[in-house]
Amino acid sequence: MSLLTADDISISFGGIRAVDHLSFEIDPGDVFCVIGPNGAGKTSIFNLVSRIYPLETGRLLFQGRDLGRLAAHDIASTGIARTFQNIKLFDNASVLTNLMLGRYRHNRAGLLEQCLFLPGARRQVLADREKVEQVIDFLDIERYRDKPAGDLSYGVRKIVELGRALVSEPTLLLLDEPSSGLSPEETLDMIFWIEDIRDKLGITVMMIEHDMRLVSAVANKVLAVNLGARLALGSATDVQADPAVVAAYLGGSPGDPLSSH
Amino acid sequence: MRGGNSVKFIRKSSYDYDLRLFPEPEDKFWYALLGIALLIAPLILPPYFLGQAVLVGIYVIAGFGLMLLSGYTGQISLGHAAFFAVGAYATAVLEKSLPFVLAFPAAGLIAGAVGILVGLPALRLSGIYLAIGTLASSFIIGEVIARWESVTRGSSGFAISKIRIGDFLLDSDARLYYLVIAVAVAALWLGRNILRSPLGIAMMAIRDSQTAAQSVGVPLARVKLIAFALSAAFTGLAGALYAHKIQFIDPDQFTLLLSVELLVIIFIGGIGSLHGCVFGAVFIIVLPQAIAILKDHIPSYLAEQTGLQAAIYAVLLLGFILFEPAGLYGIWLKTKHYFSQFPHYQKGSQKDQKSHARGESW
Ligand SMILES: Nc1ncnc2c1ncn2[C@@H]1O[C@H](COP(=O)(O)OP(=O)(O)OP(=O)(O)O)[C@@H](O)[C@H]1O
Ligand SMILES: [Mg+2]
């Protein structure tokens, strides 16, 4: 059975169909990449899955559960975590606090336990902390632990945001352009991490990405979209060779991933 | 900051470390000293200053309430005078039939419930709209208190007797002082607990990015309402204590100026820090006295302007927001850091100079 099924989903803004009757399936263990020119509707797909945008048509099923029935803050507890294209960290809080917040869905301590810091609350915080430290080791961000997130460089902020998603121990991880703004070395790190996230942590990855080197390196399925609709779906090589994809990018944008390849 | 960071690296070995109430060993010493000073203060302070100390304690509690909502959860409120008033009136009315030990917590609960009522319509507002929304709510509450004469005695005011706990009458400022300090310490302890728990972290997340908070599973409406309720409850408890300090309340005591004073406490004390509540509360009590002294030394046409105090608040607020957003607590931290580093600081900078000089000689 597929992990995430999008069946005929749409959303529009004014006259623009950002996502237009789109369907796809993600299987457990996939690294599923979404590509497409600027404004193609990629981020909007994530926002539909996150329930930030309401579904106009169609259904989203995650492990058989209808996401359309859930509130935005319930998505995390189904096991879906995400990052944002324009990085949304808690800038006034330390890296550690940012990561602790990623654990929020696992909190079992009640209001009174927390207010009085009873043993239940302490146990919760210590268990969360242990997981957070594992992720800090995994991403090698030890030296930033106590720095305010707002003071960090762009690349580090990006990694911290990845960390915040990982500490929630998701089943499905949504990454919106993980390599944009990263240096070539940082992009290489990102490739290794994504492979480890799939192989060692067993997390299924859905990601939006412009850098075709990264896509070719990690993706087993690629979905190309334009104007909110599917252009092609298949392996990275097949999709890049697809005439409809080539045409969309030729008609397209300066951020053209194919020409840079 | 250099020295501080290397220390923090070692901490990782024990996660319990960060959960301690007093992270640094020397903190324990200083807090113990502060505790002793607070305990013996009534024995050495002249009566007038003791009275002021009681007011500082009351403002710490009220400021803490506002700090939870505005400082930590990022929901600005221009209407906290209303919760202060609700607490004051609730305890006054309830004590006609209930002992203080029941009426006092009940006053907190009632203020908390009113906080939820104000919070519900405010859920969709933020920034300046939220400020206006809470201001409007506080006007409505003020109006209800002034008009509901059968219960609140309206503009003729309400006299309140001294606090009695069992057979023990708190008939002096010194006795009231100990009660106020106990409540203030309990409030700050509770605040510390919340801030090291998921709830507190969720509050700060809402302040910094609502979308991201939602994406990690924070139910925005629920956490905001909890913040409103706790915030209003503590400000209400402060109001209840204030009523007993002043022993006479009427609707004119709880105006917009009080709401602004509470904002001044958290902004000048240091937004987003519990210490800030204390620094801010001391400041707000000391300031009018400073202004009174100042008045003797400035030309009378200036000194007799009615808006002088409000104008000075405004200038100070702007100054802090522009030049020291971390408030008095930020200044305190910097000073402390400077002195703790003092010898190293010099050595370090000398070494830097030397290596710099060596570099140049190449
Ligand atoms: N909240 C919104 N309000 C109005 N229009 C929106 C909104 N979100 C997306 N759109 C529009 O929908 C279209 C798709 O946007 P989306 O952000 O999904 O594209 P994208 O493929 O992620 O682009 P990029 O590669 O630039 O990130 C665009 O035309 C965009 O302007
Ligand atoms: Mg996008």
Image (spheres, coloured by chain):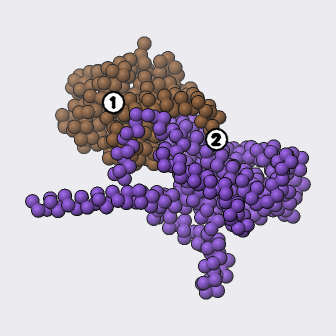
Chain colours: A brown, B purple
Compared across the picture, whether B303 is left or right of A249 comes to right
Where residue A122 sits in the image (x, y, percent)?
55, 32
Q: Nearer the viewer, residue B83 or B337?
A: B337
Q: Name the residue: 61% across, 45% down.
A: B189
> Which one is in front, A53 or A225?
A53
Residue at the spot 79% in from the left edge and 57% down from the top edge: B244
Side of B118 where A47 appears, left or right = left
Q: Which of marks 2 and 1 is in front?
A: 1
Query: Based on the displayed image, in which of its 4 quarters is residue A23 positioned?
Result: top left
In the displayed structure, does residue B224 sit left or right of residue B348? right
- The quadrant holding residue B222 is top right
Task: List the residue tagged with mark 1.
Answer: A138
The tag on residue A7 is: none
Check disc 2 and report the residue beneath it: B226
Q: Which of A235 and B121 is in front in this view?
A: B121
The location of residue A46, given as percent across then percent down, is 42, 32
In the rendered view, tell whether residue A122 sits above or below residue B252. Answer: above
| B12 on left or right of B198 | left
Residue in view at x 34 percent, y 32 percent:
A137
Return the chain for callout 1.
A
Amino acid marked by disc 2: Ile
Give residue B295's position: percent from left, percent from top: 63, 80
Q: Can residue B233 be seen in this view?
A: yes
In the rendered image, residue B125, in percent from the top left (x then y), is placed at: 59, 49
Quadrant of the snapshot with the C terminus of chain B: bottom left
Q: Is mark 2 on a helix, strand or loop?
A: helix
Amino acid at pointer 1: Phe
Q: What element carries label 1?
A: helix
- The lab-note entry on whether marks 2 and 1 share a chain reads no
